[in-house]
Image: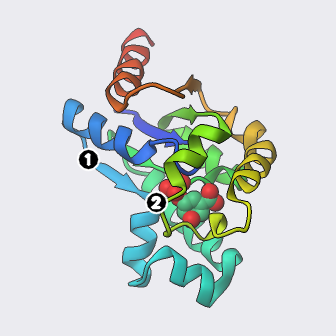
Amino acid sequence: MLKNIVLVGLMGAGKSSVARYLGAKLHKDVVSTDASIEEKKGKPIPAIFEEEGETAFRKLEKDVVVRLAQREGIIIDCGGGVVTDPDNIDELQRKGVLFYISATPEFLYQNTKHQTHRPLLADSNPLEKIRTLLKDREEAYQRADYTLKTTGLTVEQIGEEIIKLLRAK
Ligand code: S3P
């Protein structure tokens, strides 16, 4: 079986850029849970959060994860909160190798502070919010097969590290 490459980690870690890099380098399809949800609902993530709430979003996310996790040989770019449901991790691990793209709160904050498409960071103190999310989720992220400390690394460096780890497996 051709395993999937699954990227998890908090918002702003660079999962999408790394996923695109790997897709181009390894000639594999890249899919994103967020994009799949938006496609299915025909509206952007902030509108889903606003009109239907986070619980409804998590339900849609779970459906998408179950569907994407059945595929083989693809790269799956997961929304930052995918790991909050342990079943999602189990699903993704059946046919995939999980990489936790980890970074410091300060780095994540720098990468997200000028962006407006993340409802969870529309907070009066986004850095503090990032710290809280990280603390709450760290254990779940650590269930990944590999944890990569990526603060200060380029997309290419992270991508190449993943390729190296996969080849050494
Ligand atoms: C979320 C992360 C977002 C998106 C949604 C919720 C989270 O994805 O799924 O805004 O709970 O961390 P990215 O990690 O791709 O920004």
Q: Quadrant of the N terminus?
A: top left
Residue 142 at x, y = what percent? 69, 32
| Viewer-closest of 3 and 7 | 7
Q: Which residue is mark 2?
A: 33
Residue shown at 79%/50% (left/top)?
132
Say whether mark 2 is within 8 Å of ligand 1.
yes
Q: Is residue 142 visible?
A: yes
Per the model, the C-alpha gap separating discs 1 and 2 is 13 Å
**Position above or below: 143 against 153:** below
Residue shown at 45%/43% (left/top)?
15
Residue type indicated by callout 2: Thr
Residue type indicated by callout 1: Asp
20 relative to 126 in the view: left or right: left
Q: Which residue is mark 1?
A: 29
Scheme of colours in the image:
rainbow
Q: Residues within 10 Å of mark 1 (few under 14, many from 20)?
A: some
Q: Is residue 79 visible?
A: no
59 relative to 12 in the view: left or right: right
